[in-house]
Image: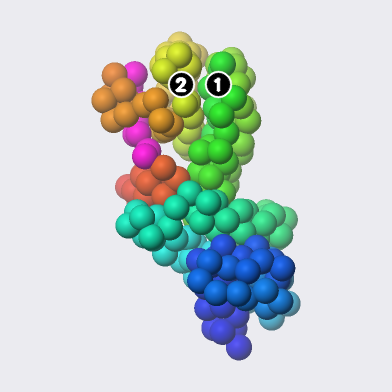
Amino acid sequence: MSEDIIATLKENVIQGRKSLEDEGIDEDLTGTPGVVELTQSALDNNIPLDVIVTQGLTAGMEVVGEKFATKEYFIPDMLASAEAVGAAMDILKPLLDASNVETKGKFAIATVKGDIHDIGKNIVAILLRGAGYEVQDLGIDVPTEKIVEMVREEKPDYIGLSALLTTTMVNMGEVIEALKENGLRDKVKVLIGGAAVSDEYACEIGADAYCVDGFHAVKVLDAFHQAKA
C-alpha cells in the first residue's frame, strides 16, 4: 500500500498534476488524486516524511529534470511539476519543522537589487525544498544590506543570488564584497544564476558556483553537502 502511494506520487510529480482537477502531460488523469491528495494520503498512512520527500517528490523531480535536459519537457511542463512539489512541501513543512528529520542545510535565495525577475528564483527554491534543504526566499530587488544582515542573523549554509539583467548582475559582486567587509564571506557558500551570468562571471566576482538552472543548483548543493559530510 505504502509503496503504491509513493510510486503514484512520484508519477504525478512527473505528470505535473498538483490536484485531482489537473489532466497531466501524457494522458487525461482528471479526477484521480494529484500530488496534494497523494501527499495527504501518504501522511494518513503514516509513511515517513523522509520517504515522501526523497522517494516521491525528489525522485519525481529528478525524472522531470532528465526530461527537461533532453528537451522532452519544456518550461511550462517543468513549472507544473515544480508547482506541484511546492504545494506538497507547503503541506509537509510544519511537520518537517516539528520532526527530527534533518535538512541538508539552510539555503537563502534572493533576486539582487534593481532586478524584479523571480520565475527562475522561485523554481530553484521549490526544487531545493523538495531536495531536502531548508529554504528562505528573500524576494526580488533585495538590497545588499538586507542580504548581509540575513547572513549575519540567520547563518545560512548557502545563499543563491539571481539576476536576469547585465545591469543588475554587478550587484552580485557587491554582495560578495559586502560579505567580505563584514567578515561573513567564509561562513557561507555563494551560488549565482540567471540569464546574464556565467561560470566566468562567477570566477570573476569570487562566487563559489554558477548554476545553469534549478536542477543544476540541486546537484551543486548536494556536492557541497557531501563534501561536508
Percent across and percent down for residue 170 are 42, 14
Q: Nearer the viewer, residue 63 or 229?
A: 63
Residue 199 is left or right of residue 122, and the answer is: left
Q: Residue at x 51, y 56 (%)?
A: 77
Q: Is residue 81 visible?
A: yes
In the rendered view, would you say 3 is above or below 134? below
210 within the magenta span: yes
Say the numbered circle drawn on residue 12: none
Of helix, strand and loop, which one carries label 2?
loop
Of helix, strand and loop, which one carries label 1?
loop
Q: Decide: marks 2, 1 in contact (CB < 8 A)? A: yes
- The quadrant of the rendering that contains the N terminus is bottom right
Q: Amino acid at mark 2?
A: Leu
Q: Amino acid at mark 1?
A: Asp
Q: Which residue is mark 1?
A: 115
60 within the magenta span: no
In the rendered view, would you say 92 is above or below 182? below
Percent across and percent down for residue 33 are 68, 75
Tell me the CA gap for discs 2 and 1.
7 Å
State which quadrant residue 119 falls in. top right
Q: Residue at x 41, y 30 (%)?
A: 195
State which quadrant residue 198 falls in. top left
Badge 2 or badge 1: first in the primary sequence:
1
Residue span colored magenta? 205-212
Percent across and percent down for residue 63 are 42, 64
